[in-house]
Amino acid sequence: MLNQKQIRDCLDQMGKMFPEAACELKHSNPFELLIAVVLSAQSTDALVNKVTKNLFKKYKQPEDYLAVSLEELQNDLRSIGLYRNKSKNIRKLCEILIEKYNGQVPQEHSELVKLPGVGRKTANVVVSVAFGQPAIAVDTHVERVSKRLGICRWKDSVLEVEKTLMKKVPKDEWSITHHRMIFFGRYHCKAKNPNCDSCPLLDLCREGQKRMRKQEKATQ
DNA sequence: CTCCCGATAT
DNA sequence: ATATCAGGAG
């Protein structure tokens, strides 16, 4: 396991590698962000942005999602994948926003997670990105990077990963750290072919060193 | 735990 | 062909 100073070194290096790390889901208000994050489950930002470019022209407020048939919304979301669940969730979610929240996106994490299709990770992204509250959303990248580096244990749940990060990282750095880890995971410490060769964190990374040894063996 | 699911990279 | 993608619900 990495100690406090080693974790600090990791985060600083990630900051140098990706100084511009920020939310890549295109949106112009909290409602659009909420929709985009719900759509992003098990999909990619690039694909979500492609779909929302047209989607947000057609659907500007919660009422607009209820004004069309379920089939029409499904058609508009088809290319994202998981589109049946997502269509149904978004319709119900819009209904609740209108009935309970005056058509606005609630700012409280505890309220957000009550919405269909919104779990802990999605709520964390919304409060952090839309409302500036400190949060660490643990997605597939944050989880993989934390486990490879040894910030947490392999068997830890996503909630345990989040708790560890919240304990090890100062609260005023939660949001930026979360984005740096995402960028590091998405563009460098990738799931398939991580760039261990050119990784400034290699001396700190047990998984990276294991991979390098394996590579060494294979090229003999 | 399984299911939902199309697009993309490898 | 197969793994992976800003997960959530049953």
Image: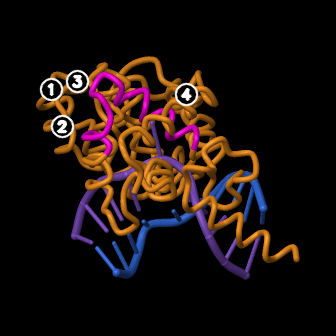
Chain colours: A orange, B blue, C purple
Q: Quadrant of the N terminus of chain A?
A: bottom left
Residue in view at x 42 percent, y 23 percent = A60
The reply to whether dot 3 and dot 2 touch (C-beta < 8 Å) is: no
Q: Seen in the image, is A28 located left or right of residue A217? A: left
User: How would you rate the neighbour count of disc 4 (Cα within 10 Å): few for under 14, some for 14-19, many for 20 or more?
Assistant: some
| Rendered position, A6 above or below A52 | below
Q: Identify the mark at residue A103; answer none if there is no mark.
A: 3
Q: Which residue is mark 1?
A: A101
The reply to whether dot 2 and dot 1 touch (C-beta < 8 Å) is: yes
**Residue A66 shows up from this direction:** no
Q: Chain of mark 2?
A: A
Residue A38: name its quadrant: top left
For the residues labelled 3 and 4, the Cα–Cα distance comes to 37 Å
**Type of residue at label 3?**
Gly
Q: Quadrant of the C terminus of chain A?
A: bottom right
Q: Identify the mark at residue A15; answer none if there is no mark.
A: 4
Q: Which residue is mark 2?
A: A96
Q: Seen in the image, is A49 located left or right of residue A218? A: left
The reply to whether dot 3 and dot 1 touch (C-beta < 8 Å) is: yes
Marks 2 & 1 on one chain: yes
For the residues labelled 3 and 1, the Cα–Cα distance comes to 5 Å
**Type of residue at label 1?**
Tyr
